Amino acid sequence: MKTELKPNEQIIKQGVANLQKGPETVGGNLYMTNQRLIFEAHDVNIQGGITEIHLSEIESSEKCWTKLLGIIPIMPNSLAIYTKSRKEYRFVLFGRGAWAAAIEENKNS
């Protein structure tokens, strides 16, 4: 993990994931700490970098479809995260139900 953890921050869950950024599905790793979700893109992606979502900002999550080019639904294997500021993040990952449960359990901690 490249991102530095804050004081009293601990990793709860981690796994490989893709983040849908417009037409590109960006590959990387997703980490959930007791404070935030952190997506770190692999260096080979066109759109790289780190995406952070504070757990306290998450309004809800729901299972959804992966979309080809960000438009055409192709597989029901994604998890959409909605923030209180109306942003949407779509992650393609294994065990999306377990991720959703972990987020729900920890978002108000």
Image: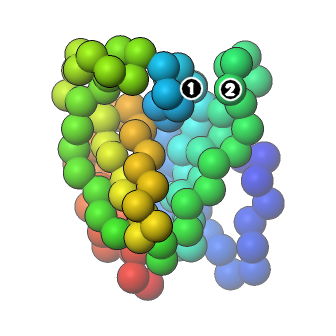
Q: Position of residue 13 (x, y in %)?
A: 48, 55
Q: In this view, does 34 lie above or below 75?
A: below
Residue at x 68% of width, y 19% of height = 45
Q: Position of residue 75 (x, y in %)?
A: 23, 20
Look at mark 2 in the image and give the residue it sits on.
47
Q: Distance between the residues labelled 1 and 2?
A: 7 Å
Q: Which amino acid does label 1 sit on?
A: Val
Q: Where is residue 76 in the image (x, y as percent from the top left)?
A: 20, 28
- Quadrant of the frame with the C terminus: bottom left
Could you tell me which secondary element the residue under label 2 belongs to?
loop
Tell me, yes or no, whether the two marked residues, 1 and 2, touch with CB atoms within 8 Å.
Answer: yes
Q: What residue type is labelled 2?
A: Gln
Q: Left or right: 25 with respect to 44?
A: left
Residue at x 46% of width, y 67% of height = 85
Viewer-side residue, 52 vs 14: 52
Look at mark 1 in the image and give the residue it sits on.
26
Q: Position of residue 65 (x, y in %)?
A: 24, 30
In primary-sequence order, the first of circles 1 and 2 is 1
Q: Is residue 13 above or below residue 22?
A: below
Residue at x 31% of width, y 26% of height = 66
Viewer-side residue, 86 vs 28: 86
Q: In this view, does 39 lie above or below 16?
A: below
Residue 18 visible to an observer of this rendering = no
Task: Give the crowd class for mark 2: few <14, some 14-19, many >=20 residues within 10 Å.
Answer: some
Task: Give the crowd class for mark 1: few <14, some 14-19, many >=20 residues within 10 Å.
Answer: many
Q: Left or right: 78 with respect to 2?
A: left
Could you tell me which secondary element the residue under label 1 belongs to?
strand
Write down the quadrant of residue 4 in the picture: bottom right
Question: Which label number is shown at residue 68?
Answer: none
Write down the quadrant of residue 103 in the picture: bottom left
Viewer-side residue, 52 vs 33: 52
